[in-house]
Amino acid sequence: RAASEEAEQWRQELADREKASDELRQEAEERQRRLEEDTSRLREDLAKAKAAEVEASKDADSSAAAGEAYRSLGDEHERLRRSLGEVKDSEAQASALAEQRHREKEELEETCRGLRQDLDSVRGLEAKAVAEVAQLTEQGGRLKEECDQRSEQLATMAAAEAKLKELTEELEARCEGLREESEHLRERLGHAQGLES
């Protein structure tokens, strides 16, 4: 029973670890998807900013307002470039996280394989224990039958002993009677011999 409880505990731990691994993998996939969406959007914005920058550079000399717009677009371009760098950093972090999760998954799978082997061993021990219990139960049944037979034999011997004791007492009583009768006959014989003399 203790082995079954330990095996059930291992199975529950294995299920919990597999569930945690699936949740972590889903989280990493979701973060990767969001990062890819943000990267795609920022790249589109950067392309638009570059196109606007080209257009603004063509008209930059036409008016001071165009120059101001050009500077604003340059600032926006720089901001987008920084944002793109941040996205790349986030992508690198997500990639490192995904690699870490992959290693953890492999370690978890290795642990699960070891637990499955241990569980198989426990099941083998359980089967062996059940077989031994059945064998011991069978031996116990045979021993009980032998004990019952011995008890019957002892009861028979006790009855025979009692009967023998009864017969012995009866024989002793008869012997005593014969000794008394012999003594009486010897007395009569002595008396008869005295008369003959």
Image: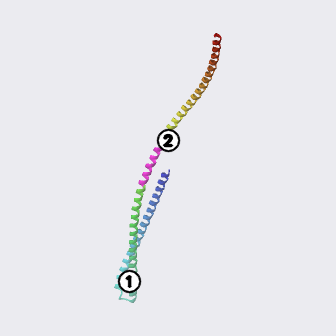
Q: Earlier in the sequence, mark 1 or mark 2?
A: 1
Circle 1 sits in a helix, a strand or a loop, which is it? helix
In the rendered image, the vertical position of residue 121 relative to residue 17, given as above or below: above
Expressed as whole percent of the image width and height from the top left, the position of residue 109 reads 40, 59
Q: Residue at x 54, y 31 (%)?
A: 153
In depth, the one of 50 and 124 nearer the eye is 124
Asked whether, in this view, residue 176 is left or right of residue 96, the answer is right
Instruction: Locate the C terminus and report the quarter of the image it occupies.
Output: top right
Q: Residues within 10 Å of mark 2 (few under 14, many from 20)?
A: few
For residue 67, what is the image quadrant? bottom left
* Residue type, numbered disc 2: Thr
What residue span does the magenta drawing correspond to? 116-140
Q: Which disc is residue 74 wearing?
A: 1
In depth, the one of 62 and 147 nearer the eye is 147
Q: Residue at x 46, y 44 (%)?
A: 132
Q: Residues within 10 Å of mark 1 (few under 14, many from 20)?
A: some
